Amino acid sequence: MANSLLTTSKILNKALMVLHQKCNFIWRINRQYDDQFAKDGTKIGATLRIRLPNEYATGTGATATFGDTTENEIALTVATQRWSAMNFLSSELTLSMDDFADRVIDPAMAKLAAVTESDAFAMTKDVYQQVGTAGTQAATALVYLQAMAAVSDALAPKSKRCNHVPPKDMAALVDALKGLFQDSTQIAEQYRDGIMGRALGADWYENTLTDRITNGNKVAAVTVSGAGQTGATITLGGLAGADTFKKGQVFTMAGCNRVHPETKVDTGILQQFVVTADATSAGATLAVSIAPSIVVTGPTQNVSASPTNGGAATFMGTASLVYGANLHFYKDAFAIAFADLVLPKGTDMAARQVMDGISLRIIRDFDVTNDKWLTRLDLLYGYKAIRPQLACRVASS
């Protein structure tokens, strides 16, 4: 009788609806690769090779130079399994779905949604463009317009752009910008709901899970050590033992300007780089992993020249500072893909359901000693900043 009221299918449906309501970041990034993992029993570690747009050389005159087409690929690996475990009495299955959702599903899925969203926001540390002042609240139109300009310079489309900010920054922005250059509907929404809606070239979303960046203990008097450096590693100098750099730190290097993505013309603006792995020095120099890779020639050229030997490496923010990193991005900057987990045998019930590409598995078994149903909900997913140049961090407090 109880099972006829609340089946696993009904529980899955409700759980997916709660997940949909509580995650406003993963729904606004690229999820077109879900189908690639939509196979029974995808394993942790399964990898999809995503092709990025090819780049070609151009020239002038009657004689053309033909080069090989080199496929640009990036790996998206399904590496994260998240679960939420519940137990409830047999009598609770006789509740209405609304009551059962309030008492069991909503609390369980709220936590599962939070850790999933937080995992995805970790991609913020892969973004190398940054505007604003680290440690100072980002509450002006100008700083978000600067982020929009940076993403536009990377040739991102104007549509499907979002800003994700924490509640404190949303509150400051709504207060600072209320009523400015907006129609009556937007103004009403600001006063009624305390949110921005669509403004400054993007849809705005309040999110308590936006990422935070931690600087290493060395940000001043850092130099480039070595001429002609290219690739995804840079040797820095001016260091002492135990100087640290943290993943997510953004910096520039003298003599290394970004170029226009198509024409390769020097823009006169220093290229920004991000540290991609924590590093600690043992002496005066240290090889640090960075993104993007330094490419000075060819179709994939992204900088005007290698960094100047002995030139300054200028890091954003003060030593050991922890600061907020809001996001302005076009949806293809990031991707997340959900996979189908295997349905085990020998349980009371194992089922799987998909909503908008998100595959959620439920496994249920019975504890005869305590008259309880032991139930777990599982997600399996992978995420990757596939085109981080289409995003820009907005440094905040």
Image: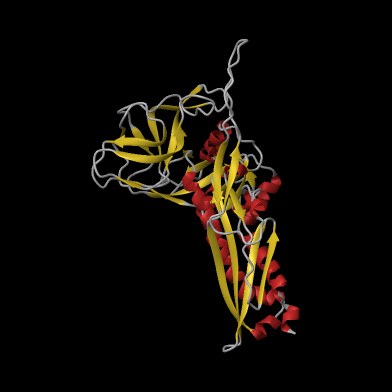
**Residue 169 located left or right of residue 349:** left
Residue at 57 percent across and 59 percent down: it is 43
Residue at 66 percent across and 86 percent down: it is 91
Judging depth in this view, the residue of 284 and 365 nearest the camera is 365
Give percent across and percent down for residue 158. 64, 36
Give percent across and percent down for residue 380. 58, 60
Q: Give the quarter of the figure containing the N terminus.
A: bottom right
Q: Could one spot residue 306 in this view of the protein?
A: yes
Q: Could one spot residue 111 in this view of the protein?
A: no
| Quadrant of the image occupied by residue 365 | bottom right
Give percent across and percent down for residue 178. 60, 46
Where is 41 relative to 278, above or below? below
Where is 193 relative to 369, above or below? above
Residue at 43 percent across and 46 percent down: it is 248
Give percent across and percent down for residue 67. 57, 23
Judging depth in this view, the residue of 60 and 23 nearest the camera is 60
Judging depth in this view, the residue of 271 and 188 nearest the camera is 271
